Image (spheres, rainbow, N blue to C red):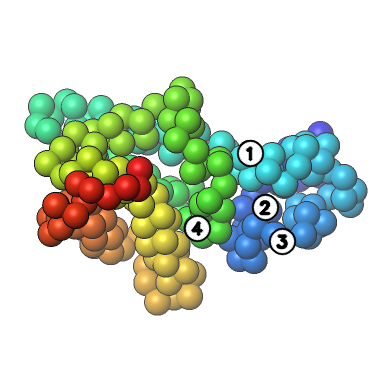
């Protein structure tokens, strides 16, 4: 099914959902998304995606395809340099493609969309890393786990779990600032500063190792 502009209706719904969820939250009425996508029939979302959850998953998968290609490119470049990427290099491979969405593809709502839906299983379920479409993220997370091996295991797990939340929040703030004209979306210095902040949060020394070793939390 295509609309009069030639864009598949399914894709128009995905793009509309990304923008409206980014701006209004994950509970935005489905009828508003359908209307923004030019669909007169309110059942269009159910037809294409089955449910709100199905639509959210579809937005994630739609953007993930672009991100995966770029992340694999960056990982290959790092491997070709024959130098260990370290925490900064791994974070660059993870985060840079998300910054580039706006510059290369004029996608300017995805970080805020992720910030709104980050508890959703589409992005929070660790089992997602077994998906072939997320090979790059699995490689990056495994690399970060090795780089943080000097931290107590439970602290390392907590920091890596928190990484997703930090990435989404910092990139969403940058996206909002760019939309408001308070920052340039293509400001690579800002990109580097955000990666520095993420690296600092991951690698900060543990100051309560004894207490952490008795922490009952997983």
Circle 2: is it few (<14), some (14-19), or many (20+) Cα within 10 Å? many
Q: Residue furthest right?
A: 41
Q: Earlier in the sequence, mark 1 or mark 4?
A: 1
Q: Earlier in the sequence, mark 1 or mark 2?
A: 2
Helix, strand or loop for disc 1: helix
Rendered residue at 82%/56% (across/down): 31
Residue 28, labelled with which disc?
3
Q: Residues within 10 Å of mark 3 (few under 14, many from 20)?
A: some
Q: Nearer the viewer, residue 4 or 110?
A: 110
Q: How far apart in space, not on screen, are marks 4 and 2 (Cα)?
A: 14 Å
Q: Which residue is identified by label 1?
A: 58
Q: Is residue 89 visible?
A: no
Q: Is residue 166 above or below residue 45?
A: below
Q: Nearer the viewer, residue 118 or 40?
A: 118
Between 97 and 6, the residue placed more toward the observer is 97
CB under 8 Å between discs 1 and 2: yes
Question: Horizontal and vertical percent for residue 109?
Answer: 54, 58
Residues at marks 3 and 4, CA–CA distance in whole angstroms:
15 Å
Q: Is residue 98 visible?
A: yes
Whichever of callouts 3 and 2 sits on the residue coming sooner in the sequence is 2
Q: Which mark is residue 115?
A: 4
**69 relative position to 47: left or right:** left
Circle 2 is placed at which residue position? Answer: 17
């Amino acid at each position: 099914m295509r609309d009069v502009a030639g864009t598949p209706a399914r894709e128009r719904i995905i793009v509309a959902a990304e923008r409206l969820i980014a701006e209004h939250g994950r509970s935005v009425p489905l009828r508003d998304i359908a209307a923004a996508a030019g669909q007169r029939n309110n059942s269009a979302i159910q037809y294409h995606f089955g449910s709100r959850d199905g639509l959210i998953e579809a937005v994630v998968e739609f953007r993930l395809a672009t991100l995966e290609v770029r992340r694999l490119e960056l990982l290959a470049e790092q491997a070709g340099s024959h130098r260990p990427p370290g925490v900064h290099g791994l974070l660059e491979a993870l985060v840079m493609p998300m910054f580039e969405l706006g510059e290369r593809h004029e996608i300017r709502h995805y970080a805020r969309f992720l910030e709104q839906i980050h508890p959703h299983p589409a992005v929070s379920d660790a089992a997602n890393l077994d998906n072939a479409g997320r090979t790059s993220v699995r490689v990056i997370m495994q690399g970060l786990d090795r780089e943080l091996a000097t931290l107590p295991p439970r602290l390392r797990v907590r920091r890596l779990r928190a990484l997703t939340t930090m990435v989404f929040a910092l990139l969403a703030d940058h996206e909002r600032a760019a939309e408001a004209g308070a920052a340039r979306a293509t400001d690579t210095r800002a990109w580097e500063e955000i990666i520095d902040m993420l690296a600092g949060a991951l690698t900060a020394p543990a100051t309560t190792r004894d207490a952490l070793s008795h922490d009952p939390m997983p």
